[in-house]
Image (tube, rainbow, N blue to C red):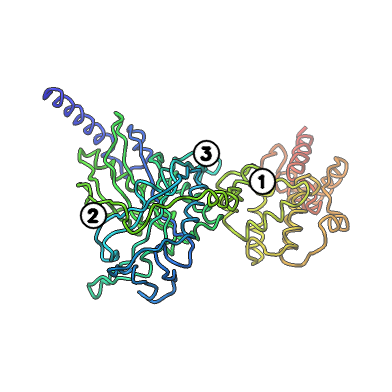
Amino acid sequence: MSSTLHRLSGLQRGFHKRIAREFSGRQSLTVTDVVKAGFQPKIGLEIHAQLPSNAKLFSRAPVDEDAPPNAAVSLFDCGTPGTLPVLNKRCVLMALKAGLLLNCEVPKWCRFDRKHYFYADMPTGYQITQQDHPIAKNGYFDFYVYRNDQIESWYQKRLEIFRVQLEMDSGKTIHDQEGERSLIDLNRAGVALAEIVTGPDLTSAVEAECFVQQLRILLMHNEVCLGEMNMGHFRVDANVSLTHPDGTNGVRTEIKNMNSFRLIHMAIQSEILRHFKIISAGGKVVNETRGVVPDGSTVSMRDKEVEVDYRMMPEPNLPILKIRPEWIEDSKNEISSDLMHLYYINEHNMNPSLAIHIATDDELRYFINRCLEAEGLTAEHLVAWLGELKKVCQNCGVNYPPKSKLIADRFAEAICLEGASKITKLTCLELLKGYVQGTESERVEEIVESRELWRITGEVEISALLKSVVQENAAVVVKARGKPESKHANKLRNALIAKSNKRIFVEDAARSVVAFLAKEKM
């Protein structure tokens, strides 16, 4: 037995030496380096979504974020002896909706438990939560994984949802550095939360960020959570570990209270790299709870090396809660998974990054939907033109996207004609400039017809225009002979386009110039 252990320890030392040798010279490590070394990040999340209720979970105290400190507190919230919890039915129904949205099983009954720990902002000395019998469990959530810098590279992933549980929030501790004291505000104590616990199936910070973003969209769409992360309505904890190359699970650390997508991404990535550096140096990762600082790195908060005994026990002042079938049916009728970004992805074949960007921007979503009403306009062609429209708006000093229905309608008309090759891109841009500046309002076809802006395709007409350009630019023609790719040839091409009042495609103009120069060479 001892010889086996000695042999294993020798192998581990050799492994750590190899890892240290391979990566010690690197100026900066990346998660790609971690994966190449045979380690697999393993990430599970706990999301605390504040439920939209006018009253707290177990008291009638108001939920008022604008109230002065300790002004929205009941006797129960501040732990007054003899007070009892009274369950808020609205919060139960909201949590039930969250579970159904996440494809969870809903049991016939659930139970509340006491989780004992002492913080100054938890005056009762315990939190009422649901440990063993939550309101919903065994669900899943399908979401899209993508990177904003690689929008064409994306995939869909299913994440297991262990449970959705109802619990009360704690108060808030404010550290006064100047006065060297901690101030307690109990306005938040007792506010209803739905805690969503996932399986440890995420493998990167990107996956975690995408999951949280799309979960938030789902809950906000169904009014289960307001989702204002800066207000603490949607907070995220992450459990991070590295699975070793031999398949053994690494030690887990917990990152607490992340309240922005940026922090979620940076903190998880930072923690993965921190684990890898410790292991590479032959050290041991300590099981602990860590906080996040503004630059996205994590700092130790409290030790978890010894398992904390929360002395969990059933809440004696609340009976078992029976989930009525009509609650489930009513909730099913009220929820919807028909999210706008899924509509863009499934119906218009948009990539998830762009679809989510549009769906979460009210003004852009309204503009896009208005444009998509145009007959014959595809989402692909519309998306391809959004960057051009943004440039036109910036050059004209107009906010993007334009709020005018007229501009949306005329934009759609113009790019439809351009997409059908009836007008050139340059003509389209000129028309857009007029609509954005407010100097044009007539329908696009009427302007194109009255000003004769239709695209020129006939070889005879293009040749006649080119002949005129050649006569006017004889010196340039001499320099361009035998050099169809030169700047002089490009000058002739541009002159031809200008001569046509921008009615010739750039490709057509270039082809005509090249053909002319080839004849001249002969």
Structural crowding at the residue carrying mark 2, measured as other residues with C-alpha within 10 Å and reported as few (<14), some (14–19) or many (≥20): few
Residue 224 lies, in percent from the top left, at: 51, 57
In terms of depth relative to the viewer, which is nearer, 488 or 350? 350
Q: Residue at x 71, y 51 (%)?
A: 372
* Residue 302: image tag: 2
**Which quadrant: the C terminus?**
top right
Residue extending farthest to the left is 2
Q: Tag 2: residue type?
A: Arg
Secondary structure under the numbered disc 1 in the rendered image: helix
Report if the CB atoms under discs 3 and 1 are less than 8 Å apart.
no
Q: Report which residue position mark 3 lands on.
A: 156
Amino acid type of the residue that numbered disc 3 sits on in the rendered structure: Gln
Label 3 neighbour load within 10 Å: few <14, some 14-19, many 20+: few
Secondary structure found at label 2: strand
The residue indicated by pointer 1 is: 487
- Point out residue 363 in the picture as x, y percentages from the top left corner: 63, 61
Sequence-first tag of 3 and 1: 3
